[in-house]
Amino acid sequence: MITPYSLHNQDFSDKAHLLAQTEVYPDFFGVARDRLEFSVLPEHERNYLDWSQGIDRVVQVKGYKGNIPLTFQERFRAKKFAKHHDATITTWNHISNMQGELYKLRAQYFLYGYFDIETGRFAEVVIFNVATFLRSHIRQTMHYTKDFNARSQQTFMSVKFEHLAAIGALDYHRKWGTSPYREQKAE
């Protein structure tokens, strides 16, 4: 079982994604918006990528000799949750008795943001490297908490943004009203 479809939730996500196309992705890649293409896939392909691979978006960065495709999982939460400064990822669905997002996540990056639908603005956004995140989880070197959502009947993990930075997975962090922050990697 997946989370039931909601027109309100879809509208919220669509508005946040459109804003991310102009404010987040160009800044993350350090390129002008016109160098980015956001793949529009047929619904059956989109559903397959999301439900079985944890991929919401394929972003193509235009290069000199072709495009470079990168995959993203996106999650947008209401601004009222921004006080938590965390990313949540489902680990188990108790209704279907099936694995959660953690076990199907094949996206290269995870974009996680707090969005205010009333103003049409982000409060805070992070992008973290999924491979680094998963490796740290496997090695048990990442601090997180586990919780249960009674409404959806799902167990989830919550990872503070500071802990994503501590494991070297945080590649982008921006609070609106401040300048963008990119985690600097040692060479």
Image: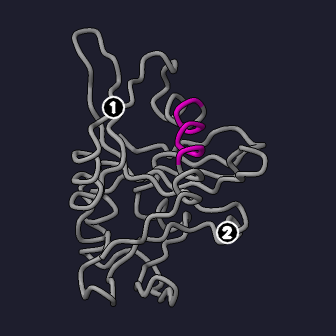
Tell me the quarter of the picture where residue 62 sits.
top left
In this rendering, the answer to whether 69 lies above or below 127 is: above
Can you tell which of label 1 and label 2 is closer to the viewer? 1
Residue drawn at 42 percent across, 70 percent down? 4
Q: How is the image coloured?
A: one colour
Q: Position of residue 84 (x, y in %)?
A: 65, 72
Residue 22 lies left or right of residue 90; in this view the side is right
What type is the residue that disc 2 sits on? Answer: Phe
Q: Position of residue 65 (x, y in %)?
A: 22, 10
Residue located beneath label 1 in the image: 39
Residue drawn at 49 percent across, 26 percent down? 30
Badge 2: how crowded within 10 Å, few (<14), some, or many (20+)? few
Q: Secondary structure at mark 2?
A: helix
Q: Position of residue 41 (x, y in %)?
A: 28, 36
Residue 16 magenta-highlighted: yes
Residue drawn at 30 percent across, 70 percent down? 102
Residue located beneath label 2 in the image: 81
